[in-house]
Image: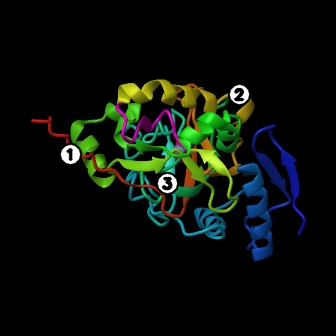
């Protein structure tokens, strides 16, 4: 089956036409979607009316799904593979996921098995805004000088969920618990994509503050340059959602963020599935302080 494809921006993103995800998908179609996704980093399939079970079935064509133990908030009872991202009250309380993704990040980079892909299905969206922005981290790497590439190729950076600014506002017990579930992880600054073999930059303003072996002060200048460089407008695509959009991105070579660009009282509800990736990085243990010479 030849699917229709339409590019959504210069840097990344493609819409795929001609799919009805209520119907079972054959392996050849899944392989074609995967190819388009690997080339475009973000794919959008519009106008879908699918159940949670159908969203889960779609995800399983691309790999095993995460049960979201590293972020234990809202999952659908019958489908724990589906994680709810919403600003609506849950059980009469303000939503824990209402500020998800406000800063640029790659999902679960703070674990040693970061996700390969995430897919959001839009169920409710404000009258204007509620967008998600994506950036191409192959381009971010490719456009650096050879000298800086050579330096970065050898570095690791520390990814730590508890440094995520909106997280720091939570109560200390919750932060300590998150730290226990997700200890800091050292990841390569330049990741080699397991399928395309291409190099992509892998640091983010949400989760990465310093390089392994350097202090935060020493890291700051270069880190800030990389955060800014990674999200130059020409590397990005901004998705304006419609109810029924299913959008899947590649966390190995793209970052994303969700600006607070809508009236807070207007409901926004996304159902997310997360497809597991291959192991990357290592749990980071601070070296013991060096004894001063006697
Ligand atoms: C995510 C995320 C952003 C959004 O699902 O990982 O960051 O637009 N979501 O809801
Ligand atoms: Mn995210």
Sequence-wise, which precedes: disc 1 or disc 3?
A: 3
For the C terminus, the image quarter is top left
For the N terminus, the image quarter is bottom right
Q: Which residue is mark 2?
A: 233
Marks 2 and 3, how far apart in space? 29 Å
Horizontal side of residue 40 vs 167, given as left or right: right
Q: Secondary structure under badge 3? A: strand
Q: Is residue 80 above or below residue 93?
A: below
Marks 1 and 3, how far apart in space? 38 Å
Q: For the point 44% across and 26% down, which residue is it?
A: 220
- Main SS, magenta region, reads loop
Q: Which residue is mark 3?
A: 83
- Front residue of this view, candidates 65 and 126: 65
Q: For the point 34% across and 40% down, which residue is it?
A: 162
Horizontal side of residue 164 vs 252, given as left or right: left
Q: Is residue 107 above or below residue 113?
A: above
Residue 228 magenta-highlighted: no
- Front residue of this view, candidates 226 and 114: 226
Crowding at dot 1, Cα within 10 Å, few <14 / some 14-19 / many 20+, comes out as few
Query: Within 8 Å of ligand 1, the CB of disc 3?
Result: yes
Residue 206 magenta-highlighted: yes
Q: Which residues are magenta?
A: 202-215
The mark lying in front, picked from 1 and 2, is 1
Any mark on residue 288, and which?
1
Q: Secondary structure under badge 2? A: helix
- Front residue of this view, candidates 277 and 19: 277
Crowding at dot 3, Cα within 10 Å, few <14 / some 14-19 / many 20+, comes out as many
The mark total stands at 3
Q: Determine the image quadrant of residue 255.
A: top right
């Amino acid at each position: 089956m030849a699917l229709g494809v339409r590019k959504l921006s210069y840097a990344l993103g493609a819409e795929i036409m001609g799919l009805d995800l209520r119907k079972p998908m054959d392996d050849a179609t899944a392989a074609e979607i995967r190819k388009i996704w690997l080339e475009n980093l973000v794919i959008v399939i519009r106008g879908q009316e699918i159940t949670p079970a159908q969203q889960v079935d779609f995800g399983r064509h691309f790999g095993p799904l995460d049960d979201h133990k590293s972020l234990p908030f809202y999952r659908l009872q019958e489908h724990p593979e589906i994680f709810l991202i919403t600003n609506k009250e849950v059980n009469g309380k303000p939503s824990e996921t209402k500020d998800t993704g406000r800063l640029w990040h790659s999902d679960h980079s703070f674990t040693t098995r970061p996700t390969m892909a995430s897919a959001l299905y839009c169920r409710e969206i404000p009258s204007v805004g509620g967008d998600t922005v994506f950036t191409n981290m192959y381009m971010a790497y490719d456009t650096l000088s050879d000298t800086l590439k050579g330096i970065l190729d050898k570095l690791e950076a520390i990814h730590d969920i508890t440094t995520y600014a909106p997280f720091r506002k939570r109560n200390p017990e919750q932060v300590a618990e998150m730290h226990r579930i997700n200890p800091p992880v050292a990841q390569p600054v330049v990741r080699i994509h397991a399928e395309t073999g291409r190099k992509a930059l892998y640091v983010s303003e949400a989760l990465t503050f310093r390089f392994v072996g350097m202090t935060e002060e020493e890291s700051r200048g270069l880190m800030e340059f990389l955060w800014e460089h990674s999200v130059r407008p020409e590397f990005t695509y901004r998705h304006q959602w419609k109810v029924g959009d299913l959008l899947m991105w590649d966390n190995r070579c793209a970052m994303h963020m969700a600006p607070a660009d809508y009236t807070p009282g207007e409901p926004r509800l996304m159902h997310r599935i997360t497809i597991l990736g291959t192991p990357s990085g290592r749990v980071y243990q601070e070296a013991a302080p060096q004894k001063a010479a006697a």
